[in-house]
Amino acid sequence: MGTWKKLPETLYEEKPLVKDIIKLDANENPYPPPQEVIESINRVLKYINRYPPEPRKLREAIAKLNGLNDGNVILGAGSDELIDLIVKAYVYEGANVAVLYPTFPMYERFTLIAGGSVVKIPLNPDFTFNLDAIIQTLSSKDIKVFFMPNPNNPTGLGPSLEQIEEVLKIAVLTVVDEAYYEFSAKTALNLLKNYENLIILRTFSKAYGLAGLRIGYGLASEQVVENLLKVKPPYNVSLIAQEAALTLLENRHIVDFRIETIRKARDSLYESLKRFKRIKPYPSEANFILIDVSGSGLSSKQVSAGLLEHGISVRVIGVLSGFQGDFIRITVGTDYENTMLIEALKKILGSKGG
């Protein structure tokens, strides 16, 4: 075990599953919730013997934030549930769903559970979007839904708004997953008024730091929202999650400050990673960085295991079919966590990767 200090800000106080681990493996916000959120949760704890109310106030707040009507908003237990609802509403056995490759695996998983077929559209070798391949696939096959993250996970890059609009013109129901959009400052929101085949997904798990409460939302036309509500289970968003999300929307200055802090940390971490001669970090618009470690003489699993010995957990992506490299994905942490990561990489890579 390498020498390192315990986190000054730990999310787990008593017997955590990840005790004393610098957790850079799940693209979480490294900062604990602000006191305002803790106080709002404490205020509603006495009501948890009741089912949660219809989240009207939160829907109204989200609609106001985005310049929409509350009929354009649907809430879910994380954006994962919203992906599931979209598949349930629009995908039947044998129907084709298009996804990028590589991308967030839940699009494929929910499609297969529903009996649908997955059509994969590879990204360019540098992980940018291959617009020609996307348009050709959506135009030539009977695609019911296309999932198009902005930015994409695990690559960290997203399409331009011009590319998104070109895709929307094909009239396939297109889900632009903006789980990380706060870090990129790019959103397809302004396209909603012109394209009823657009669904935008957002989450409170990343920039807002509520991953443990499971809450996300979708933005779409009122007709699409109505279709999704038909397959949504009742009471799907807890009272505590509603209150915490509403409190953060009322204290956007706290969220904005943390977003800017994470952006600066991301850019600094990327520059530090670029100094290693035999690993290759990819530019990112999100709160994580994809790294090719194949030139280091170590596999992604070996690098990950080495980091874990130093108390740092990262995500192994591994070898991606059709792409050169062997990859890990690292979440942007606090300055302290990022410094510990760089120091650990220096020890692990040594002459092989330094």
Image (cartoon, rainbow, N blue to C red):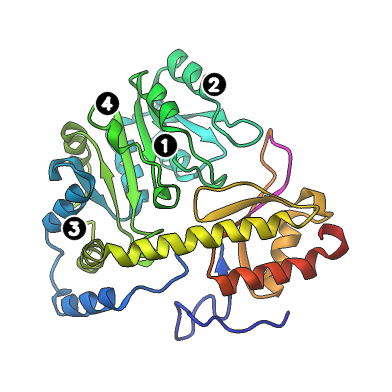
Q: Say which label, 2 or 3, has the lower sequence index.
A: 2
Residue sitting at x 26%, y 75%: 36
Residue 314 found in image quarter: bottom right
Determine crowd level at label 2: few under 14, some 14-19, many 20+ residues with C-alpha closer than 10 A. some
Reading the image, the residue beneath label 3 is 235
**Inter-mark Cα distance, 2 to 3:** 40 Å
- Residue 327 visible at all: yes
**Does dot 3 land on a helix, a strand or a loop?**
loop
**Does dot 2 land on a helix, a strand or a loop?**
helix
Reading the image, the residue beneath label 2 is 133
Residue 278 is covered by the magenta coloring: no
Nearest the viewer among 70 and 165 is: 165
Q: Look at the numbered discs 2 and 3 and tell me whether their residues touch, using CB distance below 8 Å.
A: no
Which amino acid, by three-letter code, is at mark 3?
Tyr
Q: Which residues are magenta?
A: 323-328
User: In this rendering, is residue 296 above or below 93?
Assistant: below
Quadrant in which the N terminus appears: bottom right
- Residue 28 visible at all: no
**Does dot 4 land on a helix, a strand or a loop?**
loop
Q: Say which label, 1 or 2, has the lower sequence index.
A: 1
